Image (spheres, rainbow, N blue to C red):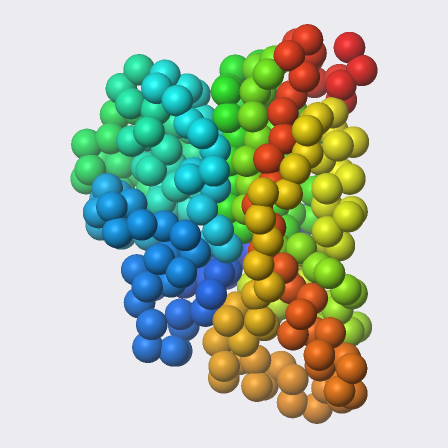
Amino acid sequence: MKEDIHKQVRSTYGEIARQGGCGCGIGCCNTGRTVESVSLDLGYSESDLEQVPEGANLGLGCGNPVALASLREGDVVLDLGSGAGFDAFLAAERVGPAGRVIGVEMTPDMLDKARENAKKGGRTNVEFRLGEIEHLPVADNSVDVVISNCVINLSPDKPQVFREAFRVLRPGGRLMVSDIVLAAPLPAPLRDSALLYNSCVAGALAKTEYLGHIASAGFTGVTVQGETVFPLEHIVSEPELAGLLKGVYLDEEERRSLRESIVSIRVSARKPAGCTCGCGGTC
């Protein structure tokens, strides 16, 4: 089952990489909107858009974790599900030549695109590694900050993702993620939709469950820095959404709940300063 989900997500995001956008986030597919306007709505600045190599911004994501991560000169940053490298390149600007950014991506087409963008932009303090975020190709206690943007919701094993993030962080290291969570359960026909899974909705957890998994991995100071309701029609293109909802009966209360239940949150947390292993905070 988990490998089926990985295969499904790889296929979808491989196609996005080949086409040049877009996926999770405020929908730009078939709306006439550009990936640049989508990114501005998500909290990125014009300066951010100018700093990255052409082709790195695919209009993905549901927030701007780099702006919230308080990155410092010399930090080592890990980007979970780095895509074509947009957030990784922004992080590289902030940590400077003394710092380093590692992007981990499981979709080969995305990985190729990110590496091509790094070469094209002359970014020598960024590297991209093939791997799954449930099994990070990164050493224990080796990074200062873990960031991720609208990717963890796609994982079939979210607790394992947070355990891995905890493992690779140095004592006192920071976690900063933007992701989609649910304020109320989805109706069953939508919960089982592959389209909505790939659009970062059907695989999303309840907000309390999501935050609980972060704490259970050993993190302290788990804090929601901000949250925004994402209407479903802003995540899935209108023709696809119309096709999905056709024949699915939802009463007025269910439709109201659906409009309000998909939420983008920005969460911060820390690995305790005294913890030097991936024990889940028990050392």
In percent of width and height, residue 213 lies at 75, 38
In percent of width and height, residue 273 lies at 64, 12
Q: Does residue 112 appear in the picture of this structure? A: no
Q: Is residue 170 left or right of residue 31?
A: right
In percent of width and height, residue 147 lies at 51, 35
Figure disc tally: 0
1 up-or-down from 92: above or below: below
Residue in view at x 70 percent, y 91 percent: 247
Q: Does residue 199 appear in the picture of this structure? A: yes
Residue in view at x 41 percent, y 72 percent: 29
In percent of width and height, residue 123 lies at 24, 30
215 up-or-down from 54: above or below: above
Residue in view at x 29 percent, y 31 percent: 93
Residue in view at x 19 percent, y 39 percent: 120
Answer with the quarter of the image where residue 204 lies.
bottom right
Which quarter of the rendered picture does the C terminus lie within?
top right
Answer with the quarter of the image where residue 60 lies.
bottom left
Q: Which of 188 and 182 is in front in this view?
A: 182
